[in-house]
Amino acid sequence: MRHLILMIVSLLLSLPSHASSQIPKSFLGIWDANADACEKQYSDMRLRISFSAIEYWESSGNLLEIIESKHSSLIARFVFRGEGESWERKITYFLLNEQRELVQVFDDGMRVSRVRCTDA
């Protein structure tokens, strides 16, 4: 019986762990098209990422679930609201260039790159 319990515990520990219910700190902050856009008060490419939400110019998304979280990548599902509509979307994020660049890959294959705004 003890051997069976140890086997079950071992199997449970070897399963992939579910990620936190928050967006990792390395992805947080303000991101924009380039350094010049970061300097402006308003930009239609600006993206704000917090622990539980993302905000764009005309819409915002609340985190539904973290599907996968690694050191420099994240896959998450959000429920969005904007312009009188709501929808769900899965987004994959990659951090590049020492976490100064964020690449978003949407579930439809569209890719968008942004840089981290340091003083925004």
Image (cartoon, helix red, strand yellow):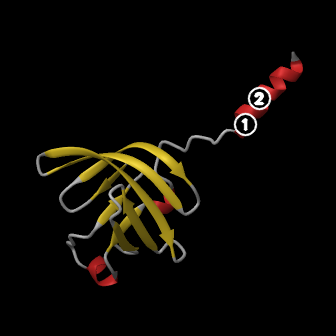
Which label belongs to residue 78? none
Q: Dot 1, how many residues are within 10 Å of its Cα: few (below 14), some (14-19), or many (20+)?
A: few
Query: What is the three-letter code of the residue carrying label 2?
Result: Val
Residue 35 position, x and y percent, is 34, 82
Residue at image position (11%, 46%) is: 84
Which label belongs to residue 9? 2
Q: Is residue 64 left or right of residue 6?
A: left
Q: Secondary structure at mark 1?
A: helix
Residue at numbered disc 1: 13
Q: Is residue 72 above or below residue 97?
A: above
Q: Is residue 68 left or right of residue 28?
A: right
Cα–Cα gap, marks 1 and 2: 6 Å
Residue at image position (88%, 19%) is: 2
Query: From this viewpoint, is residue 7 visible?
Result: yes
Residue at image position (62%, 41%) is: 17
Q: Dot 2, how many residues are within 10 Å of its Cα: few (below 14), some (14-19), or many (20+)?
A: few
Which quadrant would residue 115 be assigned to in this image?
A: bottom left
The answer to which of 75 and 43 lies nearer the viewer is 75
Q: Is residue 64 left or right of residue 43?
A: right
Q: Is residue 76 above or below residue 58?
A: above
Residue 60 position, x and y percent, is 25, 52
Residue at image position (72%, 36%) is: 13
Quarter of the figure with the N terminus: top right
Query: From this viewpoint, is residue 116 visible?
Result: no
Residue 55 position, x and y percent, is 28, 57
Q: Do the numbered discs 1 and 2 sit on residues whose CB atoms are within 8 Å?
A: yes
Which quadrant would residue 117 be assigned to in this image?
A: bottom left
Q: Secondary structure at mark 2?
A: helix
Q: How many marks?
A: 2
Residue 16 position, x and y percent, is 64, 42
- In the picture as drawn, the residue positioned furthest to the bottom comes out as 36
Query: What is the three-letter code of the residue carrying label 1?
Result: Leu
